[in-house]
Image: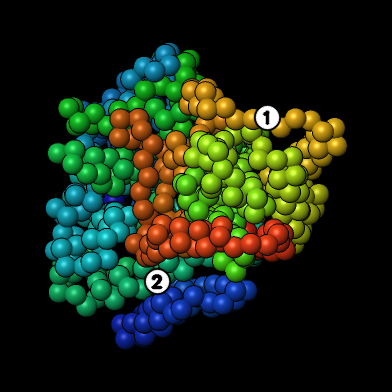
Amino acid sequence: MGKKSRVKTQKSGSGASAVVSPKEMMNLISELLQKCSSAAPSAGKEWEEYTQIRGLVEKIRKKQKGLSVVFEGSREDYFPELMSWAEENGASCDGFTVTNFGTEGYGLRATMDIKAEELFLWIPRKMLMTVESAQNSVLGPLYSQDRILQAMGNVTLALHLLCERANTASQWLPYIHTLPQEYDTPLYYQQDEVELLLGTQAVQDVLSQYKNTARQYAYFYKLVQTHPAASKLALKDSFTFDDYRWAVSSVMTRQNQIPTEDGSRVTLALIPLWDMCNHTNGLITTGYNLEDDRCECVALQDYKENEQIYIFYGTRSNAEFVIHNGFFYQDNAHDRVKIKLGVSKSERLYAMKAEVLARAGIPASCVFALHCNEPPISAQLLAFLRVFCMTEEELKDYLLGDHAINKIFTLGNSEFPVSWENEIKLWTFLETRAALLLKTYKTTSEEDRFMLEKPDLSLHSRVAIQLRLAEKQILEKVSSSGRAKRLHFQKKLEEGAPLPHYEESDIALLENTEPDAKLPIILRKLEEVEEGQEIQVEEHSHLLNGEKVVYRMEANGEPVQEETQERVSKDVHSALDSTGSSNQKGQMEMADQSASRTEEIPKERSE
């Protein structure tokens, strides 16, 4: 068991900086808050803004040197205390132990054979750190009076964690002692390591994450120093940027949703011991048992004694793993990159295309995903591209032709092309689009592979290069797949092959066919994201009786005001009444020609 005398301390002595006056620090904090709260930079200026914000943060960190709270000893010293605390509070501790797995960090090792689907781990609610426990803690008075805390559960958890870390009598100290003292999220990257991500889809998320964290820190520093409800908080005496960065990283690498005690809604929680499990491909195996009021986890597969026990974190891309969990997963079966596509509102056929897409449940402008596996595009993206490439006559057929409503069911089905020409157009577009996106990177795949062979690369640099290489490999695969599909359908057209026709009786087949691409598009939940809705929804891995849940990570997203069905319908009928031959010019216009750049904040490998 870890030594009981090992409690929190503050660094002091030669490493500490000279005393900084409260006024001087408050001026720096105010400058940081103002910089982070200014309007979003114009396109191409994001890196410049990041370096300015980082410069201010580094100035603050330098003046706060030696003031951050640390614990004596190593994490490993405290694991026996964690296991004893868990056992005392009714958690399961018999079938596993915490072990260091080298490059994978700490994880759970089976101490006996465990069968697949066997319940091996449960954690009662009283061990969890939740938004509700924060409300009932010393943080409660401030929470009740601050709308930001009330709106952002993840930030509440971060401050809750800091307050409990400073409390020598906290019931959660056995857990807090075992958390890493630093993380591998991009918040801990050096500037030159972040620079390796320039040109990637992930970089905007990384820059936004840093800006959001800096803004939150500055806001809460001022709040803690000035708000009467914060007068009893230990943070008032010492609250450094490094403290907040640590707390935010602890939360975003570990948080999950659980139901409240009455089961009426969900809340955010940190789940001790369970969060030591590392990730592998598979299925969600964790749920919440409301009757016994505990988090429960069953084995993902058979585990022999001494084998590492893994869980599945969810269908995250490697960008999400790197940004929010701090690791790159080489064998990620769910890796993907985003592509933003839209029908130009200036296009003559916009109203007709928007109406067909609306009937299929797809927005006219949307962020889609290009996948690492086959097929590289979803049924939704296939349907969008088919409509995007339709001629006026094809659009009329899907709006007013025989069985027009039923034809909507076939838009996302690869077996029922609109026409051979339409298939050639869409796959040509996709092939070209992926090739253009590849040209936006500053290095080639070959150059990235060469860099990865260097033995002196820092861990963060290696992860950054792995991530940008993974993005390129997906785009290369999509471009290659697009070319193969284009040639296939050109051959069909040249041979005069008959077009497969959709029969109304096929609907039963469509509804009961397993492959994703064959499902009726309107029967499926749209997984893509509409234009304007930045990706602020986290698909973390677990909970709520084994169902995947989503939760909003930041409270700054604005809802998209969609055009009304009535207005679009009027435009459609107007277009249908007009005469003239189909004009193909502009059909390939996009609302946004750049790859999607998205934003988020807040399970790293359990290091």
Give whichever of 236, 13 is nearer the camera.
236
Residue in the image at 61% along x and 43% along y: 382
Q: Is residue 176 above or below residue 163?
A: above
Question: Residue 83, how many percent across, how many down?
Answer: 30, 31
Residue 119 quadrant: top left
Q: Amino acid at mark 1?
A: Pro
Name the residue tied to disc 2.
215
Q: Amino acid at mark 2?
A: Arg
Residue 606 visible here: no
In the drawing, does residue 401 fall left or right of residue 24? right
Badge 1 element? loop
Disc 2 or disc 1, which is closer to the eye? 1
Residue 259 visible here: yes
Residue 194 quadrant: bottom right
Residue 500 marker: 1
Question: Residue 349, how many percent across, how many down?
Answer: 60, 60
Residue in the image at 27% along x and 58% along y: 156
Q: Marks 2/1: CA distance? A: 56 Å
Give whichever of 119, 395 is nearer the camera.
395
In the drawing, does residue 452 fall left or right of residue 1? right
Residue 218 quadrant: bottom left
